[in-house]
Image (cartoon, rainbow, N blue to C red):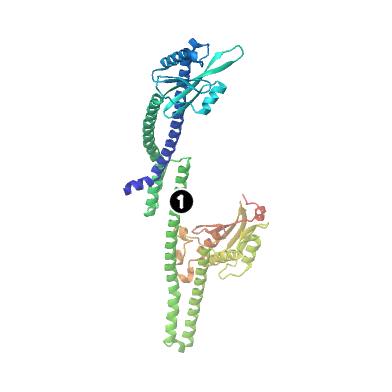
């Protein structure tokens, strides 16, 4: 029973039964209309037939007064002729103008009579009247005589017969309608189940795909043939949602893996200066503080490790802010003037020779000033560590809808094996594995994160012995698009 209940609650059965009920109501309405029309047609046809029989019988008695006592035999003969012409099942009664029954054929019968209203109308208007009285059809016809000036009703002939023949015809019609309607509804039910099953097959496929997604198969898709109807739109939206879910889960997994790697690398990097500080403190506790030379050496090493630790913590905080996209205050300013001021500042490790090839026109960018300053300083510091004393050249150009900044140094270049990894966090090339020479390995990661946070991009090209060029692009503001065109 529960299976039947679940089936009836399904969309397939609900749609089918809804259309089945609508068609049943329509068939019932059409059947009722047909029944009433056929009944009215049969009654009208029978009344017309009785009237024709009366007219044929009356031709023999077209003149004379049928209401006088002297015409009694004539009246009886007329009634007998009407009954004979209409069939032995009818009863004929003849009334005078005052409604007095004159004769009934067959004798002794008590046929029903028209109600006073239709009977009076028949007398006054001389028009045929009929109605159903009980289970009999009663029809009244005026009988008139010709007069030089008018035609007047001299008698009324009422013909009555049972409705059984008409009812039998109507019963057969109702049985036919019921049988045909039942067969039609059964066919509609079967065809409706087939059509709705075909129409709802894509929805079942979507349901199966949703179940696969829920069970963990993020690659499951409906992969329905493109359709222009609502089901096609739903399938397209569902697959798009599944793509977004898969991308979101992949991004989450990648983010978690990145966080784990970051925590592991940060822990490793932080452990080194902390261990060094703990070692020097232990040395001082063991008596090195009694020797001024050992004391100065230990304090100097502790100061360097402390400074390295400070720089590393600041870099980690910067990366955390970049990942969180916080503390970004973009504004419109001239990139040429801002870059010139930053190059004028003294940065540790900055080469003595920095060539500037800046645009002669202002280049207005939409960017965070602090982020730009951090990017430039990190690039200067990075070049000073990896290419100490090498000549640097900085240039600014407008490149389409973006400003382009190139920072080139004439250093030894980056090996091809290291080049794909230079933006990875805590990565150091083979030539700079020493922390004293290569720093923490976060500089270019910070540059990439800050530039992307501004809506820009960064790239690096290098070859051993040919120097290194770091290029980053920043979005122009509305006014910045009027700057100098990019060189061809």
Total marks shown come to 1
Q: Residues within 10 Å of mark 1 (few under 14, many from 20)?
A: few
- Residue extending farthest to the top is 60
- Quarter-of-image position of residue 231: top left
- 206 or 33, nearer to the observer: 33
Residue 160 lies, in percent from the top left, at 44, 23
The residue sitting at 46% across, 24% down in the picture is: 138
- Secondary structure, mark 1, is helix
> Where does residue 469 sit, x and y in percent of width and height?
54, 58
Say which residue appears at 38% left-offset and 54% top-offset. 214
Instruction: Single out the residue that lies furthest toward the left.
Output: 1
Q: In this orientation, which residue lies closer to the viewer: 391 or 18?
A: 18
Q: Residue furthest front?
A: 69
Nearest to the observer: residue 303 or residue 354: 303
**Residue at the outermost bottom position:** 290
Residue 60: x %, y % from top left: 48, 10
Residue 37 visible in the current orientation: no
Q: Is residue 17 visible?
A: yes
Please indicate whether residue 311 sits to the left or right of residue 1 in the image.
right
* Quarter of the view holding residue 31: top left
Relative to 299, residue 337 above or below: above
Query: Can you identify the residue that label 1 sits on?
Result: 241
Q: Position of residue 235 (x, y in %)?
A: 44, 45
């Amino acid at each position: 029973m529960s299976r039947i209940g679940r089936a009836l609650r399904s969309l397939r059965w609900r749609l089918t039964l809804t259309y089945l009920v609508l068609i049943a109501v329509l068939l019932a309405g059409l059947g009722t209309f047909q029944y009433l029309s056929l009944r009215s047609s049969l009654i009208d046809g029978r009344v017309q037939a009785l009237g024709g029989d009366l007219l044929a019988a009356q031709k023999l008695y077209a003149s004379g007064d049928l209401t006088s006592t002297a015409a009694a035999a004539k009246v009886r003969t007329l009634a007998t002729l009407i009954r004979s012409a209409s069939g032995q099942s009818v009863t004929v009664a003849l009334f005078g103008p005052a409604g007095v029954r004159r004769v009934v054929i067959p004798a002794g019968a008590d046929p029903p009579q028209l109600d006073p209203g239709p009977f009076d109308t028949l007398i006054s208007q001389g028009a045929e009247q009929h109605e159903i009285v009980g289970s009999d059809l009663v029809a009244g016809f005026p009988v008139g005589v010709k007069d030089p000036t008018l035609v007047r009703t001299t008698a009324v002939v009422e013909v009555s017969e049972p409705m059984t023949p008409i009812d039998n015809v109507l019963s057969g019609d109702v049985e036919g309608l019921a049988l045909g309607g039942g067969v039609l509804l059964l066919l509609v039910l079967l065809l409706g189940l087939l059509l709705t099953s075909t129409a709802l097959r894509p929805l079942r496929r979507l349901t199966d795909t949703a179940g696969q997604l829920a069970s963990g198969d993020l690659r499951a898709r409906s992969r329905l043939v493109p359709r222009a109807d609502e089901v096609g739109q739903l399938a397209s939206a569902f697959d798009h949602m599944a793509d977004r879910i898969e991308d979101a889960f992949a991004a989450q997994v990648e983010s978690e893996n990145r966080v784990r790697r970051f925590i592991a690398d940060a822990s490793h990097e932080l452990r080194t200066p902390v261990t060094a500080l703990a070692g020097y403190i232990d040395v001082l506790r063991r008596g090195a503080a009694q020797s001024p030379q050992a004391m100065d050496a230990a304090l100097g090493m502790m100061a360097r490790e402390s400074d390295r630790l400070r720089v590393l913590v600041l870099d980690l905080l910067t990366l955390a802010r970049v990942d969180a996209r916080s503390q970004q205050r973009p504004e419109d300013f001239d990139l040429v003037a801002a870059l010139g001021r930053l190059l004028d500042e003294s940065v540790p490790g900055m080469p003595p020779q920095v060539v500037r090839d800046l645009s002669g026109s202002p280049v207005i960018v939409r960017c965070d000033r602090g982020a730009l300053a951090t990017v430039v300083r990190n690039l200067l510091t990075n070049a000073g560590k990896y290419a100490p004393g090498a000549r640097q050249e900085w240039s600014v150009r407008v490149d389409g809808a973006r400003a382009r900044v190139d920072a080139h140094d004439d250093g030894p270049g980056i090996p091809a094996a290291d080049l794909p990894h230079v933006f990875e966090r805590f990565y150091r090339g083979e030539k700079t594995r020493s922390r004293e020479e290569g720093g923490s390995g976060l500089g270019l990661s910070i540059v990439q994160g800050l530039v992307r946070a501004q809506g820009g991009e960064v790239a690096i090209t290098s070859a051993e012995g040919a120097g290194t060029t770091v290029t980053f692009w920043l979005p122009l503001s509305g006014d910045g698009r009027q700057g100098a065109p990019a060189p061809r």
